């Protein structure tokens, strides 16, 4: 069983819409969850971290964590063409020290 | 420096040669990670250093790969007897809060 799963996409949304990206994970004991964005040809950059159940908002971005269902999601409101990128979820496994495990990423395309 | 610095940015080598990739992390960051990313693929964990603890080498793909971190700062990833399948972008990242990684621009390795 894969440790973390994401739909590879591409996920296409029109400009101004809400983009919803999802990630499921296998380790019930994981405590730390992260979303990274990677533009084509560039390195990943951290967007959000979330540690508690519920929602965490930062500007147009909202991270949602549900530990009971073992999923984490990222909502992007008022999507812009500049949001077009690959979004990677990542988390720290229980007993894995602080090693960060990444999903394979979901490609988002925001269309004009 | 202000960010994570990696060198060389590009390296072309012949099969069978050894290569060294360097990473200079953000000052004060105690954790340092190496990942690699093949074209169109996700991030593959290689090795993780945390302070003075023994490194987590669980992601190194073979004994041709090794890494060290001197003085808790600069790290060098060495690949011996390179093979064509080693061609990838090698990404270094450092963090202070666990999981909140800052990536360098990467070293693109091409093995002919």
Image: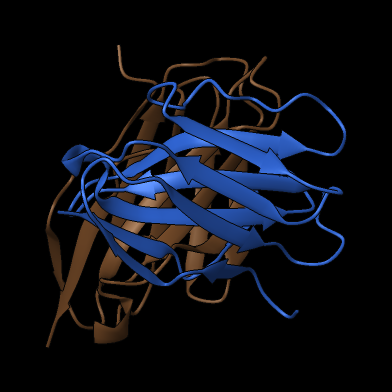
Q: Is residue B16 above or below residue A37?
A: above
Q: A72 or B78: nearer the eye?
A: B78
| Horizontal side, residue B51 vs residue A85: left or right | right
Q: Chain A's colour?
A: brown
Residue A47: image location, x then y, percent: 53, 64
Instruction: Provide residue A32's location: percent of width, then percent of height.
Output: 64, 36
Image position of A90 with respect to A67: above or below = below
Query: What is the quadrant of residue B107 in the picture?
Result: bottom left
Q: Taking B60 as reference, is B2 left or right?
A: right
**Residue A92 vs residue A40: left or right?**
right
Q: Can residue A48 be seen here?
A: no
> Where is residue A38 shown, x and y percent of the image?
36, 65
Which residue shows up at 28% across the image and 72% down it?
A: A41
- Image coordinates for residue A27, horizontal then vertical, percent: 51, 16
| Image quadrant containing the N terminus of chain A | top left
For the residue pair A55 and B25, the one nearer the viewer reads as B25
Tell me the colour chain B is drawn in. Answer: blue
């Amino acid at each position: 069983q894969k440790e973390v799963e994401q739909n590879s996409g591409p996920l296409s949304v029109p400009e101004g819409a809400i983009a919803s990206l999802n990630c499921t994970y296998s380790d019930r004991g994981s405590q730390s969850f992260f979303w990274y964005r990677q533009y084509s040809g560039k390195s990943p950059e951290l967007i959000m971290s979330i540690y508690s159940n519920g929602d965490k908002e930062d500007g147009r971005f909202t991270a949602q964590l549900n530990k009971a269902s073992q999923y984490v999601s990222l909502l992007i409101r008022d999507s812009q063409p500049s949001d077009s990128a690959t979004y990677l979820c990542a988390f720290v496994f229980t007993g894995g020290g602080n090693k960060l495990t990444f999903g394979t990423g979901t490609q988002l395309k925001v269309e004009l | 420096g202000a960010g994570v610095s990696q060198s060389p940015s590009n390296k072309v080598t012949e099969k069978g040669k050894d290569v060294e990739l360097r990473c200079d992390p953000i000052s004060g960051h105690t954790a340092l990670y190496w990942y690699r990313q093949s074209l169109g693929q996700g991030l593959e964990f290689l090795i993780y250093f945390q302070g003075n603890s023994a490194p987590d080498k669980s992601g190194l793909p073979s004994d041709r790969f090794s890494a060290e971190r001197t003085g808790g700062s600069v790290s060098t990833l060495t690949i011996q007897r390179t093979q064509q399948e080693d061609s990838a972008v090698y990404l270094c990242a450092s963090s202070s809060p666990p999981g909140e990684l800052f990536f360098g621009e990467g070293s693109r390795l091409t093995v002919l």
